[in-house]
Image (cartoon, rainbow, N blue to C red):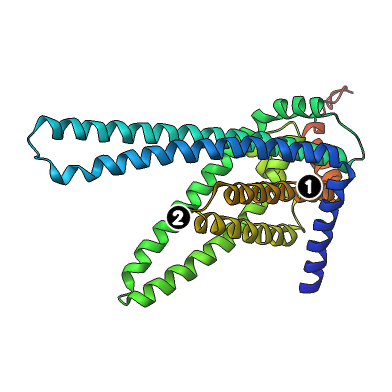
Amino acid sequence: MGSFMLLELVGTLWKAQKLFFRNVKLMFSIFLLIISLSSILFVSNMFSIKQLITDFAHETSLVPAMDAGTPEFANLLNTLKDQLRLFSRLKWIFIFTFCFAWLFFATASISASAVTYCGKDLSIKELLSRAVKSLKRLFLTWFYITLLHLGYCLFFIAFLVPSLLIFDLTFTRVTFSITIFLLALVFQAYLAVVWNLALVVSVLEEICGIKELGKAEQLIKGSKRRGFSLNILFGALSLSVFCGVLMSENAAMIPLLLLNSMYCLIEMFKLMTYTILYHECKETHGEELEMQEGTKYTKVAFTPLISADAP
């Protein structure tokens, strides 16, 4: 069973690699577009936030040397409040911009992968036009998935905090926290199989929101283990890139941009593999689902043309 799962995983990754090189011009254009956009946002965020943090640290260092009742102290507090407000505004602007860029990148990657998988060709202009049209549906699905993520995190915190109070030893608390955290990540990777497939459904089909999650749940039947293996693999790769960013916090900008490019490549291949998984699940369950959905609208009431009381 384990070897069969490994073969399925390797087979899906191999198909994704072939899919990339089958239409390398289109795929590479998407990759360069998202790298350029994310790098510009990343550099802008780093320089603007870094300068704000430096100024805030300098102003904070002056607080102990001042008297609390002087006008200078009040002006300094007002300056610190203004810097905090500016910091939060910039952070939220960058967060929303990054989210929009990722959604557009996801839409373009899924659309290009689907077109290439079906053996068709698409120009970059047509791809961008199709991505813009599908962006609204993807945003609604992403919004619902984000709510599910937040609910899962709140449930995890609500379970972990009371559990930690039961244990008195510090070592036991640390070990228990790490164990529960890893188990929570693994279970989230299992739940994210449906969530990731729902993103693909939102781009390739004319439905959005809760309906996509239900359609993805039906399509993924029998293939959840492969999706779970993909989530574990790409999650481990993304985590390694994130650890590299943390270790390179005070390093030069070029290594950070390289790590950002690696993360974009990982995300692109994950979307490609889920697009392949969608088409394979569609071939397996698609006709059955369409027949089930069709029967909902073919049931009509039968009214006899001749009354039963007629002679």
> Does residue 224 show up?
yes
Q: Residue at x 49, y 38 (%)?
A: 45
Q: CA distance from mark 2 to mark 1?
A: 29 Å
Is the residue 150 above or below the residue 301 in the image? below
Callouts 2 and 1 close, C-beta under 8 Å:
no
Secondary structure of residue under mark 1: helix
> In screen coordinates, is 28 left or right of 152?
right
Which corner quadrant holds the C terminus? top right
| Camera-side residue of 46 and 264 | 46
The vertical placement of 168 against 244, above or below, is below
Q: Hey, what amino acid is under mark 2?
A: Phe
Q: Residues within 10 Å of mark 1 (few under 14, many from 20)?
A: many
Q: Assign the N terminus to one quadrant of the image.
A: bottom right
Residue 175 is left or right of residue 234, and the answer is left
Residue to which mark 2 is pinned: 155
The numbered disc on residue 278 is: 1
Q: Residues within 10 Å of mark 2 (few under 14, many from 20)?
A: few
Which residue ends up furthest to the right in the rendered image?
119
Would residue 306 be found to the left or right of residue 181 on screen?
Answer: right
Residue found at the far front of this picture: 252
Percent position (x, y) of residue 122? 86, 31
| Residue shown at 36% from the left, 31% from the top | 86
Return the x and y of residue 95 as percentages of the image width and height.
50, 37
Q: Secondary structure at mark 2?
A: helix
For image coordinates 69% across by 39% down, the residue present is: 106
What amino acid type is highlighted by mark number 1? Answer: Tyr
User: Measured from the top left, where is residue 34 in percent x and y?
Assistant: 68, 38
First reached walking from the N terminus: tag 2 or tag 1: 2
Q: Position of residue 278 (x, y in %)?
A: 78, 47
Image vertical order of residue 189 relative to residue 302, above or below: below
Query: Residue 110 — which label?
Result: none
